[in-house]
Image (cartoon, grey):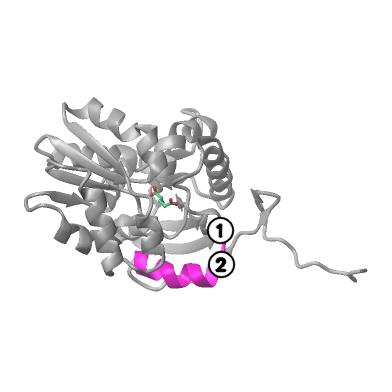
């Protein structure tokens, strides 16, 4: 079973292409929507949230976890791999940053622009990964207004266009724009209209799915034992409000979600098991 983790709805834009590419696999999606946005949070808080989410997905029976959130991939992936998926462990944890960097380097003629959250930009992880692959120039711009605009469903509005124009003005001379946040694919129409002609706008999600298929072909123990007779399935878990998650999530996945299950948060930790309904008399 493959777990996919994001700060909220955005990672559903990564889950969709992964499910399409791997129709015989079972997926569990965990969106930490009750504690999103992650983009302005401190590295320590992100490590804590990411540990809790990964532990929950492992408990659900996932042997492979995809960290779909760019912010968590940039800040916490190495830590999560060392802690939960050391080389002698049967589990693996993969992120989106290396596929994103590979895609940008493949497509760029030399100057890559990146829009991402504040924490992703400050981590410099994309700069490091791209530098390993080629001599490209990289200009990053934190775009903290964009994820909330998309969450509000305002991606087609004049406000979104103005915000996008303002951020793009800080990325002069780029030939390729990498979307370094799972929310931004919903802004593709406005971004494509706003970038100067000739600039390629890259949503890394389809490439992440391709990279996952290739990775599984090289690690066949993560493939279903009898794919021909295995139908894929999806469970969706979220912190926050499951009804809101189902409504907004459908925009990111491109279709209706199955029943969204709620994960309770108790004293700042994700509950490990569904909480039993309280019994007995309440004495006031
Ligand atoms: N999902 C996060 C990412 O891809 C962005 C949204 C947030 O700030 O939580 O970086």
Closer to the camera in the image, 111 or 206: 111
User: Of the residues under marks 1 and 2, which one precedes in the sequence?
Assistant: 1
Residue 243: in magenta span: yes
The answer to whether marks 1 and 2 mark residues whose Cβ atoms lie closer than 8 Å is: yes
**Residue at position x 56%, y 40% from top?**
45
Quarter residue 151 falls in: bottom left
Residue under pointer 2: 241
**Residue at position x 84%, y 69% from top?**
279
Quarter residue 15 falls in: bottom left
Label 1 and label 2: CA atoms lie apart by 7 Å
**Residue at position x 47%, y 36% from top?**
76
For disc 2, the neighbor class at 10 Å (few under 14, some 14 to 19, many from 20) is: some
Instruction: Give the structural element (helix, strand or loop) at label 2.
Output: loop
Disc 1 Cβ-to-ligand 1 distance below 8 Å: no
Majority secondary structure in the magenta region: helix
Q: Is residue 69 left or right of residue 44?
A: left
Residue 65: in magenta span: no
- Note whether 7 is above or below 230 in the view shown: above
Q: Which mark is residue 53?
A: none
Q: Is residue 191 left or right of residue 64?
A: left
Using the rendered image of the protein, determine whether residue 70 is visible from the camera's viewpoint.
Answer: yes
Task: Give, as a single range, the part of the protein colored magenta.
Answer: 240-252
Closer to the camera in the image, 183 or 117: 117
Using the rendered image of the protein, determine whether residue 221 is visible from the camera's viewpoint.
Answer: no
Q: Which mark is residue 34?
A: 1
**Residue at position x 55%, y 48% from top?**
53
Closer to the camera in the image, 41 or 209: 41
Residue 19, horizontal then vertical, whole percent: 34, 59
For disc 1, the neighbor class at 10 Å (few under 14, some 14 to 19, many from 20) is: some
Is the C terminus in the top left, top right, bottom left or bottom right quadrant?
A: bottom right
Instruction: Give the structural element (helix, strand or loop) at label 1.
Output: helix
């Amino acid at each position: 079973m493959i777990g996919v983790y994001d700060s909220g709805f955005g990672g559903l834009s990564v889950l969709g292409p992964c499910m399409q590419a791997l129709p015989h696999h079972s997926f569990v999606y965990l969106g930490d929507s009750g504690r999103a946005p992650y983009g302005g949070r401190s590295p320590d808080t992100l490590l804590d949230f990411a540990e809790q989410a990964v532990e929950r997905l492992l408990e659900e029976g996932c042997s492979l976890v995809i960290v779909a959130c760019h912010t968590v991939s940039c800040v916490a992936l190495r830590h999560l791999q060392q802690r939960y998926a050391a080389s002698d462990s049967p589990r693996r944890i993969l992120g989106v940053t290396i596929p994103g960097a590979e895609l940008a380097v493949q497509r760029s003629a030399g100057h890559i622009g990146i829009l991402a959250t504040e924490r992703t930009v400050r981590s410099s992880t994309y700069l490091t990964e791209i530098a390993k692959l080629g001599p490209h120039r990289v200009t990053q711009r934190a775009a903290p207004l964009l994820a909330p605009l998309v969450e509000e469903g305002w991606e087609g509005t004049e406000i979104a266009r103005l915000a996008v124009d303002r951020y793009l003005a800080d990325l002069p001379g780029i030939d390729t724009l990498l979307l370094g946040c799972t929310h931004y694919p919903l802004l593709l129409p406005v971004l494509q209209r706003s970038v100067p002609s000739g600039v390629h706008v890259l949503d890394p999600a389809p490439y992440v799915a391709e990279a996952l298929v290739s990775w599984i072909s090289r690690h066949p123990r993560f493939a279903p034992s009898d794919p021909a007779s295995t139908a894929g399935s999806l469970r969706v878990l979220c912190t926050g409000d499951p009804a809101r998650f189902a409504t907004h999530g459908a925009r990111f996945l491109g279709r209706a979600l199955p029943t969204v299950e709620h994960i309770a948060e108790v004293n700042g930790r994700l509950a490990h098991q569904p909480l039993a309904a309280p019994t007995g008399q309440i004495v006031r």
